[in-house]
Amino acid sequence: MSEYLSPEQLARRDIDEQLEACGWVVQDYKTAAVAAALGVAVREAQTTAGRADYVLYVDRQAVGVIEAKKAGMTLTGVEPQTRKYQAAYPEDRPAVEIQGALPFGYESTGTETRFTSGLDPVPASRRVFTFHRPETLARWLADHAEGKGREPGLRAGVKHLPGLDADAGHLWPAQEEAIRNLEQSFKDNRPRALIQMATGSGKTFTAANVCYRLLRYAGAQRILFLVDRANLGRQALREFQRFAIPDDGRKFTELYNVRHLTSSWLDMANEAATKVHICTIQRLHSILRGEDELDEAFDEEKSGFDTAPPEPVEVSYNPAVPIESYDLIIIDECHRSIYGVWRQVLEYFDAFLVGLTATPGKQTFGFFDQNLVMEYGHAQAVADRVNVDFDVFRIRTEITESGGVVPAGFVTEFRDRETRKRRLEKVDTDIDYDANQLDKRVVAPDQIRTIVRTLRNSLPEIFPDRERRDDGSLRHVPKMLIFAKDDYHAEDILKSVRQEFNFGNQEAVKITYRSGDSGNKPEDLLQQFRTSYETRIAVTVDMIATGTDVKPIECVVFMRMVRSRNFFEQMKGRGVRVIDSDQLRAVTPDAAVKDRFVIVDAVGVTEAELHDTVPMERKRTVSFDKLLSDIGLGSTDPDVVSSVASRLTWLNRRMTAADRAEVEQVAGIGLTDLVRGMVDALDVDRQYEAAAAETDGDPTPEQVKAAGESMIREAVKPLAGNSALREKLIDVRRSYEQMIDTASRDRVISGQFSRKAADRARAQVESWRQFIDNNRDEITALQVLYSQPYGGGLSYTDIRELANAIKRPPHRWTPDALWEAYETLDKSKVRGSGHRVSTDLVSLVRYTLGEADVLVSYPDLVNERFEAWLMQQSNAGRTFSQEQAAYLELIKDRVATNLGIEPAELAAPPFSTQGGLGKARMLFGDDLDALLDELTVALAA
């Protein structure tokens, strides 16, 4: 039936459905009965300015307007129309008006909706997922009418925030600054903000202060604290439970209910008393989708930020969790690459978004609109004694760096990775393996044993001030965290640690997501590691890599390589936290103070070239057309192919069934299959496997690269060999896409009043021409250029006089501004880009007087004349050495900016750095003075 509806009718159908889902009763104007429900939306309601698409009624009073437009229309330009209807509601009918207009205005296409609240201090539209419920508008109106500190929403409430008492709140200076800056960002109505604070500097404590102040003073209804994984949610809950409010010392949870969401069933109607929710992103997604339950392992075992779905998730409206459920969402550990796939979950709510991280990446800055309200790095934290610094102790072994050989005839043990069942086999030939295969295809127990033994034997050297046993080993092994590659590797490391340190089950433990399989809850093991003396060494994969607070750790051991700079910094951050000396001695008796920690690097991670984690889209600044063209020309560049795969995925999710059918008919393959093939071809593990299959052994890096190129070439063949498909994809994408660049950070070039560019430029040129004519007898440079158009006798002092004259009122011109005016009028007659210099005024005057047909920058003219002069010298048999030529280049550049050159100038920079006047005399002898005069005449004519 929808194929018979016009775009406008489709939009209204979608708007009707959304309104009904949000609790509104939709009625026609002719049969309207606004008392039928708390919230009624009346179509085509009459106003004194004409019929409004929808008028919203709450408790029988008109409160707002919806202006409906067809999909694809930009909505900010519709706001005046909405405002017109808001201000034109008939006076004889019940209505709530603020400053002569209904307070709430929406513009919507059914796919995009914008909302403006006249109750906000500065009413400005913002994008919302859908409409607010009538109960919410009723509450806002009641709060506004009540006054006395009650405000309709957080935007209005932040103005009531009192001054921050850092002493009462026991805030460190960095925490105080972060809170002040964030609250100012709220007051400035910045919807997103980013707080970058070093690991251990109290981000969660800072967040708890923010939550308290917004709930206590600004009228916040509910706040969501979004965590990296479930165990960090429990840690955050403990932080809120311990947090003493600055006013009277009571605990936060004595005043406000805080709930850690561990179920996917949630109805906000039952959550009125709960002021803070703590949740993971994957749990939140499950809640919005209304799923019966989320697999607990998915919430516990991996971070939703790490195990993001392969494609962006989409959510639909959930009436039990309306968009106004939260006033603020605080995203802990927000440096993860979550925004591409989880973004719609975050943007579902009409809430401020605040990110907390120690290691933001480019994506993070982009998502938070470059609004960095606090920057507090590790060096600052060390200086403030909020963090401790670190040393690096490097362990290198032959097998770690070069691999090894299992000799022929050796009875070798083979272990099933899943069941861990072992079997013995006598190998017939030598089996070589390289370092990259360690702990994957090959486990070398002695490599692990050697590292652990070296670590044990080196501890007295690493911690020379600690108590020793009679054999020279440390009496109390410092709390140590070892990072393994995976759970199997962690198991092998733990075995060696217990053997080499002579530790029992309590002294050395494995804390991974699979620890629970053996009946040991990871959080219990973590708490034991944090607070007890018994547990000295913990082996983990990445459960303790981010966010987890274990202050007594004094040694962080890397037995796994990481390539992400952000992840390395987070892992390293497990050791930076400060701890009270008494608390430290409670778990490590011979530790006087924690003034540093030690990174033990057994894999070279501290020497590696780390990179920022990158998304599939790696060529953001390159157009889709250009990327497809590159593939058509045979490119197998992984960045190009990955970016094309990313954009095809985007397109595949948005195109209509009809468009997809057309594309796939041209392609001869399904789009999903095409993208999957490209992604598989880019997988380095698959490339390695392909190379290994071809070589029947361990391939070299060159063989892996060649296999990868072959796989990529095969995967993109449907694109590379089908120009019609490439053109079809470009046409379809253009119909759907408008790129939004959030990664680039802009800087102001100019800020000035504007009118139509051509008219302004024409007026400026005419005024400039009049200025030249009026001052031809007053300004020396103009006198010279009028009488000698080619500039003979013109000095730099004369040009500076002219430059100073034009920048004075009323003109306030610069060479840049005049140049830009001529470019605007006729760019084809202007040559030379970049920043203008004062001598460009010579070119500007000549061009204005008609002495030159093209406006060419003065340095470009000098360059051309210099090349011509060199050619003349060569034709005359005069040559220059390399040193002389370099010096001549400096002289030429001087003439270009100063209209000439005198011998005395060779004693100043840049000449003085090349030997000065003495060097010039040595290079050119007695001809120097004559050469300078000759060049001045030839170049500055």
Image (spheres, helix red, strand yellow):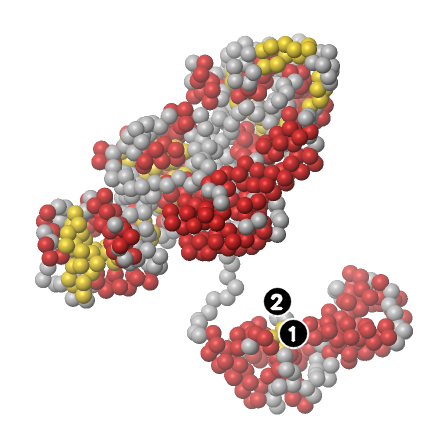
Left or right: 839 in relation to 824: right
Residue at x-position 84% and y-position 63%:
883
Observer able to see residue 676: yes
| Amino acid residing under circle 2 | Gly
Name the N-terminal-most of marks 1 and 2: 2
Q: Secondary structure at mark 1?
A: loop
Residue at x-position 65% and y-position 32%:
691
Q: Position of residue 201 (x, y in %)?
A: 48, 35
Q: Which residue is mark 1?
A: 857
Are the residues tagged 1 and 2 within 8 Å (C-beta)?
yes
Left or right: 385 in relation to 246: right
Q: Nearer the viewer, residue 537 or 381?
A: 537
Few, some or many residues within 10 Å of mark 2 (<14, 14–19, 20+) = few
Residue 834: numbered disc: 2
Q: Position of residue 798 (x, y in %)?
A: 66, 81
Left or right: 929 in relation to 628: right
Question: How many numbered badges does the structure rendering display?
Answer: 2
User: Residue 805 is drawn in which quadrant?
Assistant: bottom right
Q: Position of residue 912 (x, y in %)?
A: 78, 63
Kindly report the distance in space between the C-alpha atoms of the residues bearing marks 1 and 2: 10 Å
Q: Position of residue 745 (x, y in %)?
A: 51, 54
Residue at x-position 61% and y-position 86%:
849
Q: Nearer the viewer, residue 632 or 79?
A: 632
Q: Secondary structure at mark 2?
A: loop
Few, some or many residues within 10 Å of mark 1 (<14, 14–19, 20+) = many
